Image (spheres, rainbow, N blue to C red):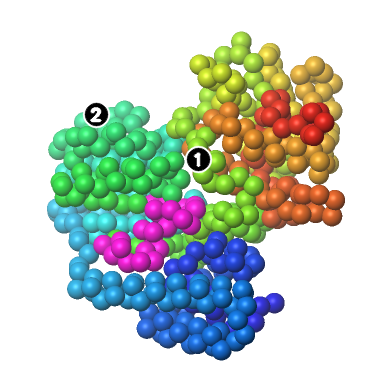
Amino acid sequence: MYSAKTKATMIDLLQSGIPASELAKEYKINVSTLAKWRKEAKPKEHSEAIEGIQKQIAALSKRKSTDAVAKQIAMLTASLSRLEGVKAKKEKTKTKIKPTVQMNADYETLKAKALEIGGLFNYQKEFLGDPSRFRVVLKARQIGFSYVSSLDALLAAVSGRSQLFLSASEMQAVILMRYLNVWAQKLGVAFKRSSEYEKELDNGAYIQVMAHNFRTVQGFTGDVWMDEFAWYPNPKRIYDVFLPSITACGGRLTILSTPFEEQSLFYSIAVNPDNRYYMYSRHVVDIHRARKDGLQVEDFDTLRDMVDADMWASAYECQFIDDESALLPIAVIKACVEDYHPRLPAPSIPIYSGFDVGRVKDRSVHASIALDEGKNGVNRLCALDVLHKASFAEQERVLTDFLKIHPLGMLKIDKTGIGMATAEKLQSRFSSRVQGVYFTAPTKEALALNLKKHLEDKTLIIPNDPALIADLHSIKRKAGARGFLYDADRNARGHADRFWALALALSYFEAVRDRKGRAWIV
C-alpha cells in the first residue's frame, strides 16, 4: 500500500512528462499502478504542478543526504525544468490557432445523410465533426474507428480530395477498403474504377490503401491517413517523409492508433508532453468511453480475463506499454517485422507448426513456420490461425486438415491439462509427425529463451500484426522459488497464446542449449 504522499509525488512526476517506465524502474512501482494513478488524477495547471515539485525539493533538501534522497531530488529537479520549459512553450503557442480544412457542399450534404442513417456512436460523430487539419486518435482496439475513418475518407473524396490510407499491415488495408464499399452502398456513391486497393470517383479523386511505405509519397496530393501508426516498424521515417508533401499541397493528416511503446513518436504526438505538437486536435477513446456511448462488447468480463493487466491497460484503456520488464524488448521484435500477409507454402514444402490449446477463456492458436527462400537459416511465419472458443472437435479437425493437406507438415501441441486428449488423438493418427509437449516450468523456459534467441539473431520473420507483437511483448521473466518463470501477468490458466504457439513451432530449430550442450526442448 502506497502513502498519499508517494502517490502525489508520482502523479506530479508523471504529469511533468517523465515516462511511467522510468518511474517504475526507479521507484519499484508497477507500471500499471502508475498508469492507473495518472488516469485517475485531475490534470494540474503547470503553475500548480511547478509549485508542488518545488515544495517537494525543499522538503527533501532538509533531510539527511543519502543516495536515495539524491536520486529523488535529481528526478524532481529534471521534472521542474521540464515543466518550466513546457509552461514557457505553452505561453508562446496560446495565440496559435489550429489549422482547419474547408469542405464543399457535397461533403456536408452527404455527411448529414451518413449521420442520419449510419448508426454512429457519439465518439465517432465527434471525430467526424472535427474540422482540424491535423488530427490524432488514441483509441482502444475494435471500437469502430476504421469504420468511421473510411466514411470520412469517402466524404472527403466526394468533395474532390484524394485519400491515401497507410496501414500497419496489408490485412488492415483490406479491411478499410471493405468498409469503404459498405459506406458507398449506403450513401449511393458510385466508383468510376474499383480494385482491391484503389477506388476512383467520377470527379477524379481516388482512395488508395496500402501497407505503410515511405516511398509512396512521390507525386501524391491529398489527405493522408496513418492507421495503427504506433505499430509501424519505422514511424518517424514515414512521418518525416510524408509531412512536407502534405503541408505543401494543403493536405490533411489523420493519425490513429492503439498505444504501444511509451518512448515513441506516436506517444509524443498523442500525449504532447512538451507542447511541440500543439497543432493536432486529440481524440482519446478507451473501451469504457466506447461502452458508455453505446458500443456493445460481447462477454466484456471474459474479454478482460483473457489478457494480463498490462495488455488490458494498453489494448483497451489507452495506456502506453512499459518495456522494462518484458522478456522481448520492442526493438528486438520490430527488427524481425516485415510487411506481408502470411500464406502457407505448397504441400511439397516442409512446415513446422505449434498449437497452443484453449477452450473458453483463452484462444487456441496454430502457428506455422517455413524456411524462407533465399535466406539461409531464416524462418518465416507462414500461418497464424486464432480460434475463439472453438470446441475440441473443431480444433482437432483444423489440425487434422492441416496434416492431411501438408504431408511434410510437423506439429508440436501443448498437451498440458485440456490439451492432452487432442494431443493423444492426433499422435495416434500421425505418430511420426505430431509431438505432445508438457508445459512445465523448465520447458516453458526453454521455449521462451529459444524464441528470444531467434529474434535476437534475426532468424525469424514475422508480419506486422499488432496482436502478435503484443503477445510477444507480454511475456515477462520473473524470479520463482526454483528459478525463473516465463509468462504473462494473468493467472495459471494460460495466456499470450500466440507467443506459445510460435515458440512451439520454433522449437524444431533449437537455438538455445544448456551448459552441457543438451537441447532444452523435449
Disc on the earlier residue, 1 or 2: 2
Residue at label 2? Answer: 193
Which label is found at residue 334?
1
Q: Residue at 19% across / 50% down in the picture?
A: 247
Kindly report the distance in space between the C-alpha atoms of the residues bearing marks 1 and 2: 36 Å
Name the outermost residue toward the front: 65
442 within the magenta span? no
How far from the left and from the top, in percent, is residue 41? 50, 77
Under circle 1, the secondary element is helix
Under circle 2, the secondary element is strand
- Please give left or right for residue 114 compared with residue 19 in the image: left
Q: Please determine whether, in this image, residue 508 is positioned above or below residue 363.
A: above
Under mark 1, the amino acid is Lys
Which label is found at residue 37?
none
For residue 64, what is the image quadrant? Answer: bottom right
Q: Please determine whether, in this image, residue 269 is positioned above or below residue 57.
A: above
Under mark 2, the amino acid is Arg
How far from the left and from the top, in percent, is residue 75? 50, 72
- Give whichever of 157, 97 is nearer the camera: 97
**Label 2 Cα neighbours within 10 Å, binned few <14 / some 14-19 / many ≥20:** few
Q: Please determine whether, in this image, residue 344 is positioned above or below residue 318.
A: above
- Please give left or right for residue 325 compared with residue 229 in the image: right
- Give whichever of 46, 362 is nearer the camera: 46
Q: Give the range drawn in magenta.
A: 256-279
Q: Quadrant of the C terminus?
A: top right
How far from the left and from the top, in percent, is residue 212? 37, 38
Q: Residue at 64% across / 67% down in the picture?
A: 28
271 within the magenta span? yes
- Give whichever of 136, 477 is nearer the camera: 477
Prevalent SS, magenta region: loop
